[in-house]
Amino acid sequence: MGLAKTEMFTDKQNEIALFAKVFGHPARVSILQHLFKIDSCVCGDLVNEIGLAQPTISQHLKELKHLGLIKGNVEGTSVCYCINKENWSNMKTVMLEFLDQDVSKIECC
Amino acid sequence: MGLAKTEMFTDKQNEIALFAKVFGHPARVSILQHLFKIDSCVCGDLVNEIGLAQPTISQHLKELKHLGLIKGNVEGTSVCYCINKENWSNMKTVMLEFLDQDVSKIECC
DNA sequence: AATATTAATTGTAATATTGCAATGAACTAA
DNA sequence: TTAGTTCATTGCAATATTACAATTAATATT
């Protein structure tokens, strides 16, 4: 298949999985870390910084933008990307709720 | 391709991506949530709870176990699964460091 | 021993992901 | 207008993922 049966899961579970999936590639992790460090930067900078081909970076940026985690502003011939603060915070809330489940009570078999 | 060029990224970036990737499917999110709620349970319980076929659940469990996030104890003919507390905490530390990047300073373009 | 139960493994089909060359679109500069 | 710059899109090949039927392995029960 290669196709997740999303209809069997809650909206929240699917949302968590979608966010996690986009973080599931080191290039996208790297892009996001760079945007946090540099505040905002142009697509070409990321191509130089990361070393993947331009279409590849462009595709990863598209996925991040599609989930709303970054914004892209056209500035002449270049496009300036940056973190979407509000959506990042919302994503963080969702992911923390999942990651922060209480481990202390667990009594394993 | 379909193959991430992991050699271009730091160990930390690859580690974050690997953890995120395993959370990138709602079935695995669901399995983990259930284990947190129920404390520990047998593979067959997860098959009933989630509704995917047994080999499919078994495969997802294998991935979670491979990353060390769960443990499986054989008990007769059944296998009892539970969260690996220590490894879960370590994973949480890694993921929080990534998710908790400071949004307040960002001045977008 | 023979049968039943439970879960892992194997094999396979369908779909998704990754990466890049080639191209196209939009703007800039000469 | 022409040429250059920057990024998105398209098309394709290689690999990965998801799901399950069929089977196997291991233990339990009769």
Image (cartoon, coloured by chain):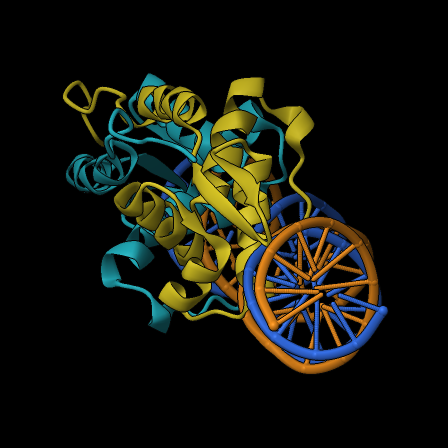
Chain colours: A yellow, B cyan, C orange, D blue
Please say whether residue B61 is visible from this viewpoint: no
Please say whether residue A14 is visible from this viewpoint: yes
Is residue B84 shown left or right of residue C12? left
Is residue A69 shown left or right of residue A6? left
In the rendered image, residue B95, in percent from the top left (x then y), is placed at: 27, 39
Name the quarter where the N terminus of chain B is drawn: bottom right
Residue B8 vertical position relative to residue B56 in the rendered view, above or below: below
In the rendered image, residue C7, in percent from the top left (x then y), is placed at: 45, 45
In the rendered image, residue C2, in percent from the top left (x then y), is placed at: 60, 52
Work out whether residue A81 or residue C12 is closer to the camera in this orientation and state it.
A81
Q: Residue at x 42, y 25 (%)?
A: A91
Q: Residue at x 18, y 34 (%)?
A: B85
Q: Residue at x 23, y 35 (%)?
A: B92
Residue A67 vertical position relative to residue C21 in the rendered view, above or below: above
Callout count: 0
Work out whether residue C29 or residue A108 is closer to the camera in this orientation and state it.
C29
In the rendered image, residue A78, in percent from the top left (x then y), is placed at: 55, 53
Residue A12 vertical position relative to residue D2 in the rendered view, above or below: above
Work out whether residue C26 or residue C13 is closer to the camera in this orientation and state it.
C26
Residue A37 vertical position relative to residue A86 in the rendered view, above or below: below
Work out whether residue B89 or residue C24 is closer to the camera in this orientation and state it.
C24
Name the quarter where the C terminus of chain B is drawn: top left
Q: Quadrant of residue C4?
A: top right
